[in-house]
Image (cartoon, grey):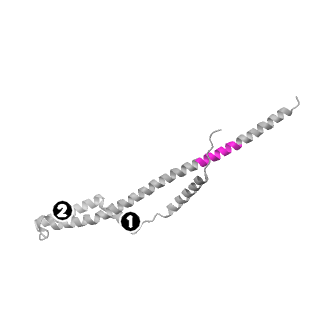
Amino acid sequence: MGHKIHLSDQERLQLLELRNERRARRTRQSREIGERVADAVAAGMGSWRFIIIQTTILLIWIVLNITGWVMAWDPYPFILLNLALSFQAAYAAPFIMMSQNRQSEIDRKRAIDDFDVNVKAELEIELLHEKMDLLRDQEIARLSRIIEELCARLDTRPG
């Protein structure tokens, strides 16, 4: 007859919670302004456009300073340029780290979502098995009654 799978009350409750959590999660997809700024800065600094613009600015700085067209404002091996780049790196690193942390959190939540979806799918499949078993048992009982009625009719037939 096959195996019967019955969802326990705890599994049914878990299934209901997963369904409700999924609906609730869809509605809270907002980000704070700091998260948006960190993502924008990290995306901007991680682009070819940023690299090209920064390289152009650095080359102009170096050429103008070396040739002295606009008075060598950064004498000695480019201490002011080094300070500007250090300043940029000091501020860029936290933005990039915030963006990476947020992405890690998003990835962690996705992994939890994937696990929840898998659990929900498993429970839903078990529920379907349970329903199919119930339908099969009802059909077998109905067919058994029909066979019994036919046998009874055959036995009572005048011979």
* Secondary element type, mark 2: helix
For residue 35, the mark is: 1
Query: Magenta-highlighted stretch: main secondary structure?
Result: helix
Q: Which numbered tag is attached to residue 50? A: none
| Mark 2 Cα shell of 10 Å, populated few (<14), some (14-19), many (≥20) | few
Question: Disc 2 marks which residue?
Answer: 59
For the residue labelled by badge 1, is the local secondary structure a helix, a strand or a loop?
helix
Above or below, 75 against 103 in this view is: below
The residue depicted at 22 percent of the width and 65 percent of the height is 86
Q: Position of residue 42 (x, y in %)?
A: 32, 62
Please state the horizontal and vertical placement of residue 123, each as a whole percent of the image.
Answer: 57, 50
- The kind of residue tagged 1 is Glu
Residue numbers of the magenta segment: 126-138
- Which residue occupies the extreme right position in the image? 158
Left or right, 128 with respect to 118, comes to right
Which label sits in the foreground, 1 or 2? 1
Question: Which residue is painted at 74% across and 39% down in the image?
Answer: 143
Could you classify mark 1 by the number of other residues whose Cα lies within 10 Å: few (under 14), some (14-19), or many (20 or more)?
Answer: some
Pinpoint residue 23: horizontal percent, then vertical percent: 53, 60
| Image quadrant where one finds the C terminus | top right
At 77% across and 40% down in the image, what residue appears? 145
Residue 9: in magenta span? no
Dot 2 amino acid type: Leu
Q: Total label count?
A: 2
Name the one closer to the observer, 56 or 21. 21
* Residue 48 point in image, percent of width and height: 28, 58
In the picture provided, is 143 more to the left or to the right than 2?
right
Q: Is residue 131 magenta?
A: yes
